[in-house]
Image: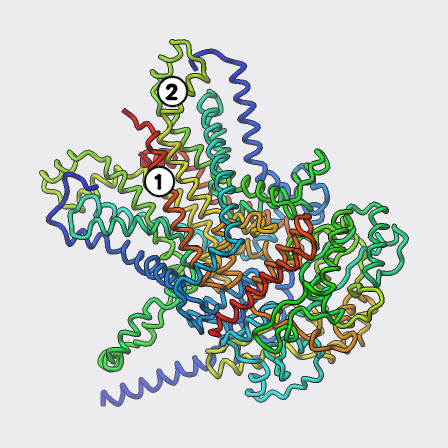
Amino acid sequence: MIKRVNFQRHKPLAFLLLAPQMLVLAMFVFWPAAQALYQAFTVTDPFGQHSTFVWFDNFRDVLSSPEYFNSIYRTAIFSTGTTVSAVLAGLAFAVLVDRVVRAKSVYRLMIIWPYAVAPVLAGVLWLFLFHPIYGAIALMLKQGFGIPWNPLLDGSDAMLLVIVAAAWKQVSYNFVFFLAALQAIPRSLIEAAAIDGAGPIRRFISIVFPLISPTTFFLLVINVVYAFFDTFGIIHALTQGGPGGATDIMVYKVYADGFLGLDLGLSAAQSVILMILVIGLTAIQFRFLERRVKYAQ
Amino acid sequence: MRKRLLGAFAGIVSAFTASVAAAAPIEIQFWHPTLGPIDDALKQQIDSFNNAQTAYKVVASGRGTYDETFNAAIAGFRANKSPHLLVVIGQGTQSMLLSGAVYPVQDLLAAEGYKVDWDNYIQPVLNYYRTKDMKLLSLPFSVSTPILWYNKDGFAKAGLTRPPATWDEMGEYLTKLRAAGFECGYTSGWQQWVHVDNYSTIHDLPIATLHNGLDGLNAVFTYNKTDVVKNIARLQTWVADGRYTYSGRQGSSATPAFASGRCAMMTHSSAVFSSLQASAKFAFEAAPLPYEAGTTPHNSLIGGGALWVLKGHKPEEYKGVAAFLAHLASPDQQAKWHKDTGYMPITNAAYEKVKAEGYYDKYPQQEVAITQVQRGTPTLNTMTVRLGNANQYVAALEEEMEAVWANKKTAQQAMDDAVRRGNEILRRFERQRGN
Amino acid sequence: MIERTPKLDLFCHLLLIAGVIAVCLPLYYALIAATHTLSDVLQVPMPLTPGNELLANLKVAIERGDLGRQLLNSLIVSVGVTVGKIAVSILSAFAITYFRFPFRMTAFWLIFATLMLPIEVRIVPTYAVAAHPLQGLGWLLDETGLRGPLESLTGWNVEAVVKWNLLDSYAGLILPLMASATATFLFRQLFLTIPEELLEAAKIDGASPMRFLIDVLWPMSRTNVVALTVILFVFGWNQYLWPLLITTEASMTTAVIGLSKQISAAPEAVPKWNTLMASALLITLPPVMVVIVLQRWFVKGLVDSEK
């Protein structure tokens, strides 16, 4: 898209303006990404002394390993769990804060601050709370409520823990967007519905929710991408993909195989597959979900 | 005339800069994993070298975990910016050896004219890092071996007066300790190191063919066919009745679990000594790892970090590296390092020195590791583990062990799967080296 | 409110308070840990109220961890990334939306593509580039045999130039982090919503493109810029993988890296949770302050541009 009114006689200036960004991108993104892509087709030793071009062997190895399919499965659970809980919690907070009259800004402050915490620190904080041996909340669960909490051994406990930690960080972001969307709804619409006899719940379902659907859709896309790519630090701090591969999501496996296993070819192949997957998911979301989104008249 | 003045001026300037350059010490980059409280002891060692001479300056850089440090070195090497010295964890020996990036320590010291009395070194410690022809590849740095730590006060509470010698005894002890009120009887750090690797060497069982990979690249794992399976199955029953509590992969929670008094016994590196001294509020003792009743135990494997010298640096820098290594190996430095950190001394001279001071009368825990690695006659099965991509196959093995603790697989199934995955990883290692 | 629903209102407040407690719980426990001694923290169960060791722990954290230097590094990186990225992005968004030139759409799609290439995926080659950016130049000079003549003719130290690298430098920390498309997109979306009449009027007045940018677009972008400042500052401050690789000197470490190195120290050691949590609180303070102080614009800027 381009502005209807634009500058047509200043082409050199345009190139000049673009140059800094393109230079940085070329040097630090495109060139390295191309190299990483090339690595996906080679088997190479960690120090880079021997490199053999093996066509699609790495992809074949990746796609035929049961551990990789476990990883895809875990990623599906993790991203669904994180997205759903973060979006719902964000919406719930926004609805509540929009509704109360007093202390709005205090609540808003208390809900927004986790956005500023580094993912790896967030992981550490939650580990500190929920560690089965010395975590304060963990002990409360075990001694106070008799729940056998052990994310070191129980895969579902571990998955629950990482979902909670990942969602916790995203709730702030979703909250901000939902709150603004709610506050943008014209009061007249709500009042009209109230006059017609609709209670708060009814109003929410038939008026508010459809009107915030562009925001909901946008956040769903963003949250899914977040769950796929930005949650590495949290998994690394909390479970390192364990126990028994229960939280071995794809982006963590890329890191584990590349940095811990030092198999750069295998890791690069996984990165390629991961990127294709995310692009595909985003495309699907655009295609199917966007139809049901009601943009403002 | 002007030309001559200019020439003279240039001469003075170059002489000046040359002298300045000569005066500035040659920097030697030393990359190591962050060792927590032990970083202080390391700093003292390095300062003692830097302060004693002006030609070289060792610059230490803590790079995170063992893995992160290794990755930084790889990235650095690929970009021609590698350090001179790198600390690599023991299980990474094969990967380092075949990396094509190392300068064997024995060669370096010989080339720089140092006459080293290798016989004065504690042999099992050196053997781990030697080739088949007994050439030393790297200098042992933060040496440890897993031993049994136990809560002496807790033992007294349960009426126990000496540490268990066999695994059967340990089982009985644990029942008594649990009855005496311990929520957690036994936990372990580095579970794979203790229960697969060291269990095998102590009982002279091979972990893989070709003498654990010493003889060649095409070794295959065999521990799913040995008593290792029996050991894991036994631990599985201990998890079920609460005698064994799992503390996570590398066991970073094992030390706090023991130090806080919750667990009565712990198998962990001998190097946790300094941490325990700082944080345990009870009397703690050390003992050798238990063995199977009716067998004669052999030596355990050493582990921890070793110092590797990387290729690609200038000859005058290597002089400094050699000087630093010689400094580290001196009896005084070794003795201080051993006492400050809990890592083992690597020379007999240092060991004797510390012994003569009466140190082990006060801290007998520190001697257990040294006796344990020298116990029995070493065989080619108990010398080392020389398998590549250790990070990956250890991770796979630990995953399978977790499945056992969670009762998702039997010990045999898990070990079979671990061996299958481990072998795939070893074959990939071969391919990576262009084979 | 439309109806008077005091019971529902009370219920909302209760829910909110419960929610806020859940969200702030990690912070509270971090505070407790940061205010006690290590042995108190290791106790089972941990004390439930803060102690009074905060200053002592902070002192140890700052001294042992060289925290002052690290915080400065984090600040320089965050500010550098923020200013750099905003400057570069506003220029290229301006170029893409307001100029007609060949390869315009190509440039746009190239920039869009970088959204799909997070740094985790290309980190080793990016490091290689940062370690030897002018490697290509050196190769070129060698292949064409120009190196020798160039050196003797000009007296330049070509070797030193070719071997220039970005390791252990602020440039190395900042530049690769500036390389992504999110800010460009935000500005593009914003510029697309700006009425055409403004530019028409400016053209009639004979304004040059740069004048238009400075006098019209820049003032209108202010909310976006503030929102981006928040996002980029937090992003730069919290970086983990990249600074870990590119810095070796202790004097160049950032605060987050320094802290995570302490936490992930060798498994044999017991992490000193009390000083570590004190550090964590101190380290998280600047980005939190930025978010809190710039809240309103943060919200406005994000939301307006999403449309």
Determine the secondary structure under disc 1: helix
Residue C273 screen position, x and y as percent: 63, 49
Q: Which amino acid, by three-letter code, is at mark 1?
A: Val
Residue B125, can we see it? yes
Does residue C157 appear to the left or right of B320 in the view shown?
Answer: left
Look at the picture and state if A141 lies above or below A269.
above
Q: Quadrant of the C terminus of chain A?
A: top left
Numbered disc total:
2
- The Cα atoms of the two marked residues, 2 and 1, are separated by 32 Å
Residue drawn 24% across and 88% down?
A: B3
Residue A98: image location, x then y, percent: 44, 24
Q: Dividing the image into 4 quarters, which one contains the N terminus of chain A?
A: top left
Circles 2 and 1: CB distance less than 8 Å?
no
Disc 1 crowd, CA 10 A, few/some/many (<14, 14-19, 20+): many
Q: Is residue B34 visible?
A: no
In the rendered image, residue C22, in percent from the top left (x then y), is placed at: 57, 33
Chain ID for label 1? C
Q: Which residue is mark 2?
A: A207
Indicate the secondary structure of the residue bearing disc 2.
helix
In the figure, residue B395 lies in which quadrant? bottom right
- Foreground residue among C212 and A178: A178
Compared to residue C108, the image places residue A198 above or below, namely above
Residue positioned 77% across, 51% down in the render: B238
Q: Residue B20 location in percent, x, y?
A: 43, 80
- Which is closer to the viewer, label 2 or label 1? 2
Q: Which residue is mark 1?
A: C226
| Both labels 2 and 1 in a single chain | no
Question: What chain does mark 2 sit on?
Answer: A
